[in-house]
Amino acid sequence: MRVLITGAAGFLGSHLAERFLGEGHRVVGLDNFVTGSPDNIGHLLENARFKFYRYDVTDFIYVEGELDGVLHFASPASPIDYLQLPIQTLKVGSLGTHKALGLAKAKGARFLLASTSEVYGDPAVHPQPETYWGHVNPVGPRGVYDEAKRFSEAMTMAYHRYHDVDTRIARIFNTYGPRMRQNDGRVVSNFCVQALRGEPLTIYGDGSQTRSFCYVDDLIEGIYRLFNVGYTDPVNLGNPAEFTVRQLAELVLDLTASDAGIEQRALPEDDPKIRQPDISLARELLGWEPRIEVREGLRRTLEYFSGL
Ligand code: UDP
């Protein structure tokens, strides 16, 4: 196969490119480096089956030759990123998704959208099944990301229904691992970097909010399987093992033998209180579930950050 990945220099995009290359496919990667980094793909550039172009996918995308797949992973995805880049976030979710779908349609390629658990907002249903419509504040600070992704899901379904494009929607829950940015602002990268520097871990609010953390290799396996099955409705991908932010902090302190402790900060506006994927559908459809426990995943992530 020959596939195009938008956001190929990002955290997930680069792991996904690596996976497709590892399976013997050809990959065209696009990224404008707003949040992605050349460091993430340096090792892939030697591979003759990988082509990379610095490009903003909100502009018309022209690619020569045949494509079997378009995987749309371009977007700022961390709360601090989309708070600093609200217009880019809205544009890549709307205009970028439109362009990527247009390309898939023109090439007769399969399309996979990287959607998010943020489409569920601050959820009133727990855990979140795909059938839950969500609880999103459209005008809050996170609305730029949540609504862009909700729009991109609607656009994907429209291209499927009206243009017959073969589409997939992955609703990705919190994922962590090597190649997250050190200053990404997300909880796992913050805690790892802080602990390695011997600084106190910053807990926002009282730390009772929960998240469910999936190690990147597990997530990529789920994406790869989803791409290869014939199912067009959204599918949750994430690890159902749910932790409070405080538990996560304690785990990181324990793994790093740090005695720097914890420092409490203000809770960001509209911060979801709970989050846990219901992955029954992915289990049944893909025969998939995460294998790497958070302790092991954190160990590998700490190893990555300590080598930077
Ligand atoms: N958080 C925290 N300390 C940090 C960074 C984040 O306590 O240094 C909290 C944040 O308020 C949220 C959770 O950790 O409740 C997960 O935040 P993250 O930014 O990783 O992603 P989100 O799931 O909110 O998109």
Image (cartoon, rainbow, N blue to C red):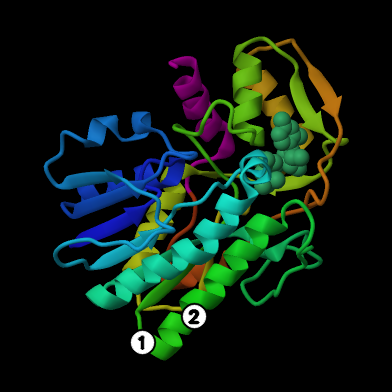
| Magenta span contains residue 295 | yes
* Image mark for residue 164: 1
Q: Is 229 displayed left or right of 24 in the figure?
A: right
Label 2 Cα neighbours within 10 Å, binned few <14 / some 14-19 / many ≥20: many
The quadrant of the picture showing ligand 1 is: top right
Q: Amino acid at mark 2?
A: Met
Q: Is residue 173 visible?
A: no
Classify 274 as above or below 83. Answer: below
| Stretch of the chain drawn in magenta | 291-308
Q: Marks 1/2: CA distance?
A: 9 Å
Dominant secondary structure of the residues highlighted in magenta in the image: helix
Q: Residue at x 15, y 52 (%)?
A: 24
Q: Amino acid at mark 1?
A: Asp
Taking 10 as reference, is 119 above or below it?
below
Q: Farthest residue in the bottom direction?
A: 162
- Left/right of residue 298 with respect to residue 108 in the rendered view: right
**x, y percent for residue 227:** 35, 66
Tag 1 secondary structure:
loop
Residue at 23% x, 36% y is 44
**Residue 241 or residue 115, whichever sits in front:** 115
Where does label 2 land, which residue? 157
Residue 155, labelled with which disc? none
- Nearer-the-camera pick, 83 or 260: 83
